Amino acid sequence: MGQYQTLLYYCYSPIENAEQFAADHLEFCKSIGLVGRIIVADEGLNGTVSGTPEACKAYMDAIYADGRFNHTEFKIDEVEEPSFIKMHCRYKPEIVHSGLRDPKIIDPTKETGKHLEPKEFMEMKDQEDVVILDVRSNYEHSVGRFKNAVTLDIDNFREFPEKVKELEHLKGKKILTYCTGGIKCEKASALLLKEGFEDVYQLHGGIIKYGKEAGGKDFEGDCYVFDNRVTVPVNSVNPTVISRCKNCGKPTKKMINCANAKCNEHFTQCDDCGWELEGCCSKECQSVPDKREYDGTGYYVKIPQPVNVEKISKRKHKNFPPKNKEEVQA
């Protein structure tokens, strides 16, 4: 068991005065010693937070105590150090940027694809009339994806709606969608249904839950995550590496950012090329005099700050967590 935990979660549930909620929620997270990134929108929450087991339990207890979020499912990873440096909690128009904000178009709280538990997904994915659809971006599925999955040439999930028309030939098939933790599939599967796809499913809990409950079987490569770990292994049954070094073509699952901050390209690079090019994507970037110092990681983050849970009982909060049942919005 690691010294810390990292929690991945999302929840579609309307939040009134979401901007104020985000400000209050940030203070609460800081007070219990969490670090991470949370997006708050009128439609709900989307977050990855990290801290000691005590801090993470305090956070989950607070989420479950609020009637708006008591159906939230947390994916919990044991880690040796916090997966973030700071705590961010920001208000945005959507909890995952898709451009599909109008609930009259799609509403994940009302209609989505049928949810498949990991073992159900594993049993169904190889059937002849099934298509596995990866709804993530290029940099995500470049380091890991399900065997035989259909991938889309998109740099951001907001491009997904425009790509649906390219899937017309798959109508009549069973479409099994998947993503990292499930949040993108909620809107992706809902949009597919709206566009006339009749037999749509989604992997409940995403790749992360599939790794924990189905051993990650037939997921090739590693799973991209949005924290300092960058990628995590999920396949303990038949693991493989599918990504290759941008510079020499050798198999590698290591993703870094170019040491030239003005370039900052996110790419795969093996250790040999990393040291030879000083963490740069090219000789041109390596020649830049003010490039960042490469330490072998390519993350360019500060040393993680110590997590402190002693403040849990020392601070009071205006709106979160609720102090009693009467303050919980059902």
Image (cartoon, rainbow, N blue to C red):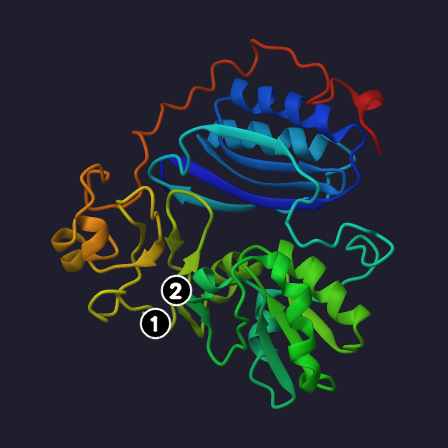
**How many numbered badges does the structure rendering display?**
2
- Give the residue number, with chain letter if any, for mark 2: 143
Percent x, y for residue 281? Answer: 26, 56
> Looking at this rendering, what residue extends furthest in the bottom direction?
128
**For residue 162, which quarter of the picture?**
bottom right
Callout 2 crowding tier (Cα within 10 Å): few <14, some 14–19, many ≥20? many
Decide: is 107 above or below 200: above
Q: Residue at x 45, y 46 (%)?
A: 77
Which numbered disc covers residue 153? none
Residue at position x 70%, y 41% in the image:
93
| Mark nearer the N terminus (2 vs 1) | 2
Q: Is residue 116 visible?
A: no
Could you tell me which quadrant the N terminus lies in? top left
| Residue situated furthest top in the rendering | 314
Could you tell me if the residues under marks 2 and 1 are in contact, i.e. CB atoms within 8 Å? yes
* x and y, in percent, of residue 170 in the image: 67, 84
The amino acid type of the residue labelled 1 equals Ile
| SS under mark 2 | loop
State the separation of the CA atoms marked 2 and 1: 6 Å
Q: Secondary structure at mark 1?
A: loop
Q: Quadrant of residue 164 in the image?
A: bottom right
Residue tagged 1: 242
The C terminus, quarter of image: top right
User: Three-letter amino acid code at disc 2?
Assistant: Val
Q: Residue at x 42, y 61 (%)?
A: 234
Answer above or below: position of 114 versus 5. below
Identity of the residue drawn at 83% across and 58% down: 105
Q: Is residue 66 left or right of residue 292?
A: right
Label 1: few (<14), some or many (≥20) within 10 Å? some
